[in-house]
Image (tube, rainbow, N blue to C red):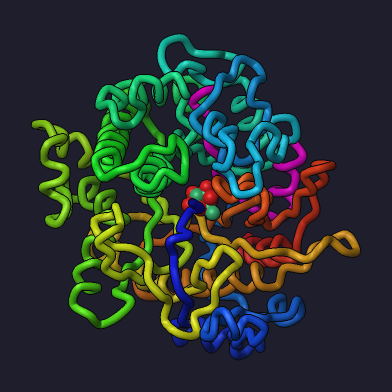
Amino acid sequence: MKRRDFLKGTAGIGLGAGAMAALNAAGMMPVTRSAEADTMPTATTITPTAETVMAAPLPHLPKSFLWGASTSSYQIEGAVAEDGRQPSIWDVFAHQPGRIADGATGDVACDHYHRYAGDIDLLAQAGLQAYRFSIAWPRVMPTGRGEVNAKGLDFYDRLTDRLLEKGIQPWACLYHWDLPQALQAQGGWTNREIAGWFTDYALATVKRLGDRVKHWAMFNEPSVHAIFGHAIGNHAPGLTGWQNYVAAQHHQNLAQGMALAALRETHRGLVLGTVFSLQPVHPATDRDIDKAAAIRFDAVWNRANLDPLFKGQYPDVLAASFAPLVKAGDLDTIHQKVDFLGVNYYGRAHVVDDPNSVLSGATFGPLPPGTPVTSMGWPVEPDGLVELLLDIKKNYHNPITYVTENGAGYDDPAPQDGTVSDPQRAAFIQMHAEAAAQAIAQGCALKGYFVWSLLDNFEWAEGMRRRFGVVHVDFQTQQRMPKLSYHLLAKLAQRQA
Ligand code: FCB
């Protein structure tokens, strides 16, 4: 099963007044896509032109607002057997027949391991000030524990130095789902001991790079890893069931807390945080059972990350499920100070009750009529970002936040005249930049925006067929070609300079 392909139905637009006005001014209002009327009667898409999106008014953002791009190791690096790297759970999973929609693997991906210097030039040429990448645990500790593989760390050393040479801040994420397979053989995230293994790996990595890399995220989207990798099974390691979800979620929380505490104790001057996938959850209908389902879904997707970190507790509706795993002191360990919260935002979840769903009997339902969708079927809801950031401000003491991922998977046209025309993706970024400005105007401590992604890459269970890059990658030749959205991002970033 594909990621979120239990997302059913069609969709609704809910842009805030400011974003609406900006779009209106630029002639970018969403319109119904009639070609799809038969199958998706109410689905819409946004249909801006290159001219309108590039001419759209710039959002009012502070001068200090940070612009960057995000990637992750398994999705771009390739070189899976080089310099001592051993398989991760994603190598194993991607090679199992039928797991990946188009049969792709990350064996080569964007060959970034060899082409990182040119890729960093692309960041620099766009005037981006920060780059969020992830470190592959199986490069640093090929079997997950014990001896450090210096050659694996050498790669991140070169990458870091090149970024700094170009004046770009390195933001390293310690875990973006590529667990060493050797640890999976010992239970992976279902084994409580992994909290200590992760902390050892974090310490070894920061010991080598922490003199130059100041910004560290512990995790990328632990809930997505727990849900898709451990409950639904359409992501590596392909486990299923509620118990595996609960274990994977709790042990990631614990690992995050232990690593944060250990890094704080051993290193001064680092900026430590973590990254969550967050989406405002709404019932898809006004039925009481869907309202109750929305509360449970919100707990699983969002609050099982946020509440333990910021409040030292699990949400009430999950407390009984987590209780058997929570040992004395665990919640204190997880309840850590973070210097920033990374927010990965793509859209809202519109949820219905579904007794067959492993996710506490709740699942994605139909989108409000008229909601535009991307080629992934994900709703385009920039005002959901404002709603989300206001929720974080209200419920979690307004922490410093960065949008660490936001972007869109669209089926791009073939490259022409040295570029790829992706006005929909550009408009998506533009609308979310406007939403960011609205959230700041309403007092949210939002300090920056990282697009997902710099490059087209290996999109997990979707393989190579879903493109999120602002730079097109020809996977045959590895040629890179900036898209219109890259130029839009450059325009947004450069006005801050
Ligand atoms: C996020 C993941 C990222 C990418 C985007 C599209 O959930 O963190 O790796 O796949 O979705």
Q: Is-magenta flag for residue 125?
A: yes
Residue situated in front as seen by the camera: 489 or 186: 186
Toward which corner of the image does residue 155 lie, by quadrant? top right
Above or below: residue 179 compared with residue 238: above
Residue situated in front as seen by the camera: 466 or 307: 466
Specify the quadrant that holds the C terminus.
Answer: bottom right
Q: Position of residue 490 (x, y in %)?
A: 69, 61
Q: Position of residue 477 (x, y in %)?
A: 84, 42
Left or right: 104 as drawn, with respect to 431: right
Tell me what residue is drawn at x 27 percent, y 34 percent.
251
Tell me what residue is drawn at x 54 percent, y 78 percent.
372
Tell me what residue is drawn at x 57 percent, y 82 percent.
44
Q: Position of residue 267 (x, y in %)?
A: 37, 26
Above or below: residue 382 compared with residue 204: below
Tell me what residue is drawn at x 46 percent, y 46 percent.
234
Residue 235 visible, this angle: yes
Above or below: residue 6 compared with residue 426: above
Left or right: 96 as drawn, with respect to 265: right
Outermost residue toward the top in this view: 147
Toward which corner of the image does residue 239 lie, by quadrant? top left
Write the start and end of the magenta stretch as one range: 117-138
Q: Position of residue 123 (x, y in %)?
A: 69, 49
Left or right: 248 as drawn, with respect to 113: left
Residue situated in front as seen by the camera: 338 or 8: 8
Above or below: residue 475 compared with residue 96: below
